[in-house]
Image (spheres, grey):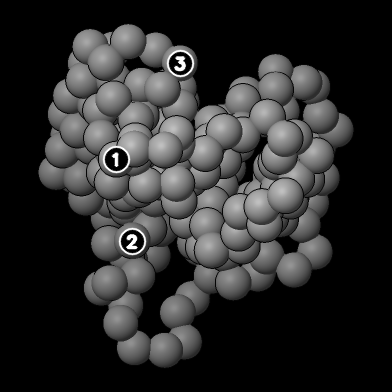
C-alpha cells in the first residue's frame, strides 16, 4: 500500500481561498478548511493519483481535488440557514478600527480590494480567486467549479471589470463625519 498524499502542504492555499470565500471572516474560513480536510481524509480512497505515464503532477491534481471539495462545502454552507453569531476575537479584522502601525495607505488599499471582492457575486468572486490568486488554469477552475471553460472566462471578465470600476472610485471619509458613514467621490 502506498503512502497517503500530504494534505498539509496545501493548507496555506486552502486557508487563503477559504478566507476570501468567507469575506475575510477568519473563524468561518478556519472552519471551512477544517471541514474540507476532514472530508478529504474521510474520502481519500476516492482521490485518484495520475496514471503511470500521465504528465499531470499528483500534487496539482490533489490541490484541484481539495479546492473542489472546499467549493462544494462552501456552497452547502451558503445554502443552509445559520444563526447569526458575533465573533469574540476578530478585533484585528475590523476595517473601522484605527491603525496603530505604519503602512496606512497599504491597509486602506487592501480594505478597498477586500470590499470590492466582497461585493462581487459569489460565482464571479470564486473564478477571480481561483484564476487570479490561486493561479488555476481556466480548465482547472472550470473543473473545480463544475462549469464550462467559457463560463469561467466570462465570469472572470465580468469580475475584472467590476473590480476595475469598484477600485476606480475610492471611498473617502469626510473629516467630522459620523463614524461608519462613507462618502463616495
State which tag comes first along the sequence, 1 or 2: 1
Q: Nearer the viewer, residue 116 or 132?
A: 132
Q: Is residue 159 left or right of residue 98?
A: left
Q: Is residue 138 left or right of residue 71?
A: left
Rendering coords of residue 130 (x, y %): 36, 39
- What residue is at 21 percent from the left and 20 percent from the top? 153
State which tag comes first along the sequence, 2 or 3: 2
CA distance for labels 2 and 3: 30 Å
Q: Which mark is residue 55?
A: 1
Count neighbours of disc 1 (C-alpha within 10 A) and say few if under 14, some if 14 to 19, many if 20 or more.
Answer: few
**Helix, strand or loop for disc 1:** loop
- What residue is at 32 percent from the left and 77 percent from the top? 104
Rendering coords of residue 58 (x, y %): 45, 46
Q: Is residue 128 left or right of residue 94?
A: left
Rendering coords of residue 30 (x, y %): 69, 55
Give above or below for 180 relative to 101.
Answer: above
- What residue is at 70 percent from the left and 22 percent from the top? 76
Q: Which mark is residue 146?
A: 3
Residue at which label 2 appears? 110
Q: Is residue 169 visible?
A: no
Amino acid at each position: 500500500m502506498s503512502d497517503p498524499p500530504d494534505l498539509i502542504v496545501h493548507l496555506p492555499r486552502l486557508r487563503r481561498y477559504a478566507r476570501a470565500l468567507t469575506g475575510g471572516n477568519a473563524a468561518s474560513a478556519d472552519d471551512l478548511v477544517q471541514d474540507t480536510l476532514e472530508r478529504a481524509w474521510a474520502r481519500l480512497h476516492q482521490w485518484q493519483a495520475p496514471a503511470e505515464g500521465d504528465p499531470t503532477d499528483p500534487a496539482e491534481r490533489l490541490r484541484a481535488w481539495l479546492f473542489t471539495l472546499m467549493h462544494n462545502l462552501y456552497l452547502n454552507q451558503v445554502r443552509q440557514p445559520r444563526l447569526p453569531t458575533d465573533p469574540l476575537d476578530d478585533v484585528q479584522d475590523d476595517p473601522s478600527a484605527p491603525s496603530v502601525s505604519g503602512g496606512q495607505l497599504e491597509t486602506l488599499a487592501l480594505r478597498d480590494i477586500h470590499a470590492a471582492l466582497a461585493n462581487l457575486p459569489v460565482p464571479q468572486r470564486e473564478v477571480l480567486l481561483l484564476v487570479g490568486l490561486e493561479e488555476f488554469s481556466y480548465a482547472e477552475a472550470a473543473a473545480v467549479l463544475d462549469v464550462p471553460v467559457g463560463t469561467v472566462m466570462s465570469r472572470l471578465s465580468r469580475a475584472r471589470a467590476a473590480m476595475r470600476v469598484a477600485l476606480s472610485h475610492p471611498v473617502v471619509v469626510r473629516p467630522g463625519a459620523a463614524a461608519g458613514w462613507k462618502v463616495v467621490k
